[in-house]
Amino acid sequence: MIRDEDLTYRVRGCVYEVYRHLGHGFLESIYQRALLQELERKGLGVESEVPISVRYKGQVIGDCRVDLLVENRIIIELKAQQKLPLGAKAQLLNYLKATGLNLGLLVNFTFPKATIERIVL
């Protein structure tokens, strides 16, 4: 099994490869499809638009979708904005809580480079 540090390193490499080829300025959905392909090319298990249920006191009260889930261990939340919205980090933290996972990457494909923030619960 790949350790989380090694897996995170491999995912980061894929993010930078996508940015190297596409640069900045595309919609988030374009980066999502490109990153999905790159992660698969590197032999990583990855799912896109994974549905998760949000529970309150044991009852499902809503559903949302995570952009990418790598090896069932890392949630990747993608953005393509000059400046991250204030709620972007909170959104990823909430996804981690809802899934019971403890590691996420907040990726922003922006100018002058892609940024990656590692979020741990």
Image (cartoon, rainbow, N blue to C red):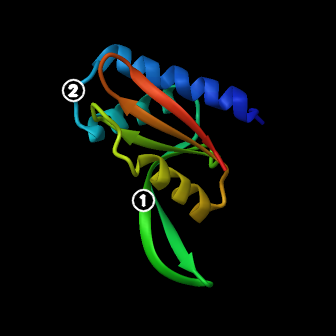
Kindly identify the amino acid type of the residue bearing the numbered disc 2: Gly
Residue at 57% over, 64% down: 98
Kindly identify the amino acid type of the residue bearing the numbered disc 1: Arg
Q: Is residue 48 left or right of residue 103?
A: left
The mark lying in front, picked from 2 and 1, is: 2
Q: Is residue 53 left or right of residue 31?
A: right
Q: Which residue is mark 2?
A: 25
- Where, by quadrant of the figure, is residue 28 drawn? top left
- What label does residue 33 carry, if any? none
Residue at 53% over, 20% down: 13
Q: Which residue is mark 1?
A: 65
Spot occupied by residue 87 in the image (x, y as percentages of width and height): 40, 52
Residue at 48% over, 53% down: 90
Is residue 80 depicted above or below 20 in this figure? Answer: below
Q: Is residue 15 left or right of residue 33?
A: right
Q: Secondary structure at mark 2?
A: loop
- Where, by quadrant of the figure, is residue 21 drawn? top left
How many C-alpha atoms fall within 10 Å of the one at disc 1: few (<14), some, or many (≥20)?
Answer: few
Spot occupied by residue 58 in the image (x, y as percentages of width and height): 62, 84
How many C-alpha atoms fall within 10 Å of the one at disc 2: few (<14), some, or many (≥20)?
Answer: some
| Among the two numbered marks 2 and 1 on one chain, the one whose residue lies closer to the N terminus | 2
